[in-house]
Amino acid sequence: MVSDSCERHKSRITDIAFNPTADLIATCSNENKIELSSFQANLSKSEERRISMSMNEPVRALTFMEDLASHSNILFSGTGCQICITDCSSGTTFRVLKGHKGMVTSLCTWGGCLFASSSADKTIRIWDTRVTEAVRIFDPLTRPGGLLFEM
């Protein structure tokens, strides 16, 4: 049995995510930390691979994406108002995306290189991992009558 995530975090766990093949699990908390662990039902604690990543701010959201070129796992984390992109094999953050004015509250990936983020600033941003800025911003405050999605 894999050890309990509560043993790794001393404060409230804010999100949990599995990679696409369900052999990695990531958890984050209010203590500015992400725990990344191997996840296999038959793996003993002594064989479990674990990486602990310290962040500058509390982490509220996590999601995984498979790098289509290298087939490695990439972790996206909403840390404060920014999104950190981390290589799971090394635990190294290799890109930080900025644009939100409020804390990132949710992340969702799809399509191999696209992902969406929502924020306390009441916007939704669509990102392409091949560029460093959001490719689309949905802002409910820009139009009278609320949020209107146009593509």
Image (cartoon, rainbow, N blue to C red):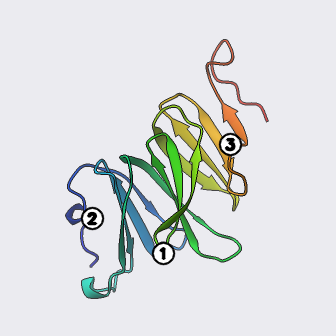
| First along the sequence among labels 3 and 1 | 1
How far, Cα to Cα, is label 2 from label 1? Answer: 20 Å
Crowdedness near tag 3: few (<14), some (14–19) or many (≥20) residues, C-alpha within 10 Å: some
State yes or no: discs 2 and 3 in contact (Cβ < 8 Å).
no
Lateral position of residue 150 relative to residue 75, left or right: right
Total residue callouts: 3
Q: Is residue 17 above or below residue 73?
A: above
Indicate left or right for 17 with 42 as reference: right
In the rendered image, the vertical position of residue 134 relative to residue 55, given as above or below = above
Depth order, front residue of 6/1: 6
Residue type beneath disc 1: Ser
Residue at 55% x, 36% y: name it. Answer: 100
Residue 122, horizontal then vertical, whole percent: 54, 28
Residue at the spot of label 1: 90
Find numbered disc 1 in the image and state the secondary structure of the residue it sits on. loop
Position in image of residue 126 (x %, y %): 67, 43
In this view, the residue farthest toward the right is: 151
Circle 2: element type: helix
Residue hosting label 2: 5
Q: Which residue position holds label 3?
A: 134
The C terminus - image quarter: top right
Q: Is residue 65 above or below residue 144?
A: below
Query: Counting other residues with Cα less than 10 Å from the Cα at mark 1, is it few (<14), some (14-19), or many (20 or more)?
Result: few
Counting residues from the N terminus, which is met first, the one under dot 2 or under dot 1?
A: 2
Q: Mark 3 falls on what kind of element?
A: loop
